[in-house]
Amino acid sequence: MDEKEMSMREALSLALDQAMAADDRVFLLGEDIADPGASGPTAGLSTKYGHDRVLDTPISEAAIVGAAIGAAIDGLIPVAEIMIMDFIGIAADQLINNAAKLRFMTAGRTTAPITVRTQVYGGLATGATHSQTLEAWFMHIPGMKVIVPSTPRDGKGLLTSAIFDPDPCLFVETIRLQGQKGLVPTDPGFSIPLGQADIKRPGTDVTLISYGRSVHESLAAANALQEQGVSAEVVDLRTLVPLDIETIVESVRRTGRAVVVHDAVQFAGPGAEIVATLQSECFSALAAPIERVGARFVPTPAAAVLEATIYPSSARIVAAAQRTLDKAGVDG
């Protein structure tokens, strides 16, 4: 399979481009997504496919998602963009009470094959109402699928799967990863199944479980731990719903220790569900209590020097891993 080095932004753009080329029913809608104003993954697509398939909408998140749901019911395949995740609450009723419920309320006769792309700005000193990581809200909603890629390859493969999935998918992009580069398959048929975690680095002493930006902090932490003689396995969840329980359980049973890391607020965050599952499935194999490293439970400050203390860092992850090792020693 041919591969090309590209940024996350370019990989997502390629996924959108190839999906639109493959199926005339695929169309995009959102604020400032058409040329000449587009600057993200949708740049150039309205010029290529026309403004009837790349629709600039009014600034109304509820209208964007509502229109997407209606189009999906009518047989189209919409990809809606909510520019900043903080504003997705305005469309929450459409997502929670309409898109997520259609399959159930129609006895499977009607689904909502919509993909909602949204972006997380955390770590860019954008303030308390432009920095929130809110995927935990939608993990709690039966019928929604939640996807958070960490690499360009995963971004392209997962977005392709989301677009053609029969159920509503929330696809969370991290602005801080948009410029990150990596090898990406250029084949239009390339996709990554939803619900498959990926072991980004094998290890034997402790499992670091993460997704999105925090995967890179976890990899940096694994490098630091290696210098201390500790072998850390890094598991990238990639999708939160469906959650690949089999992979994380198998990893933690092997290592006996786990640290769950995410940029979402730690209190009642995605890690709480993961820890509860591991505690139930791996209790007899655990050599130490499971640790969590998440964003601190405060509104995000606009000052960069303060904001840097909010999100998980490799140093905080190393400290958490060391606490699990100190409970019984590396050899258990």
Image (cartoon, grey):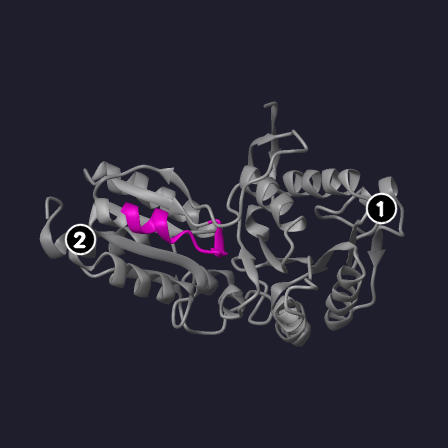
Disc 2 or 1, which lies upstream in sequence?
Answer: 1
Q: Rounded to the nearest whole Å, what is the CA distance between mark 2 and mark 1? A: 54 Å
Q: Which mark is residue 299?
A: none
User: Which quarter of the picture shows residue 155?
Assistant: top right
| Count of marks overlaid on the render | 2
Residue at 31% x, 53% y: name it.
317
246 left or right of 324 in image? right
Q: Nearer the viewer, residue 244 or 2?
A: 244
Q: Residue furthest top?
A: 2
Counting other residues with Cα less than 10 Å from the Cα at mark 2, is it few (<14), some (14-19), or many (20 or more)? some
**Residue 248, x across and y down, in percent:** 34, 50
Q: State whether residue 316 appears in this view.
A: no
Q: Is residue 66 above or below residue 153?
A: below
Does any portion of residue 234 appear in the rendered image?
Answer: yes
Find out whether the residues at labels 2 and 1 contact each other: C-beta distance under 8 Å.
no
Q: Is residue 249 magenta?
A: yes
The spot of residue 261 in percent (x, y) is 37, 56
Residue 218 locus on image (x, y percent): 37, 47
User: Which residue is identified by label 1?
Assistant: 46
Find disc 2 in the rendering and name its residue. Answer: 285
Give the residues drawn in magenta, as a range. Answer: 238-251
Q: Is residue 279 in the magenta section? A: no
Asked which secondary structure carries label 2, the reply is helix
**Residue beneath the point at 84% across and 48% down:** 35
Among the 4 quarters of the image, the one containing residue 81: bottom right
Of tags 2 and 1, the one toward the viewer is: 2
Please give left or right for residue 268 compared with residue 95 in the image. Answer: left
Tell me which amino acid carries mark 1.
Ser
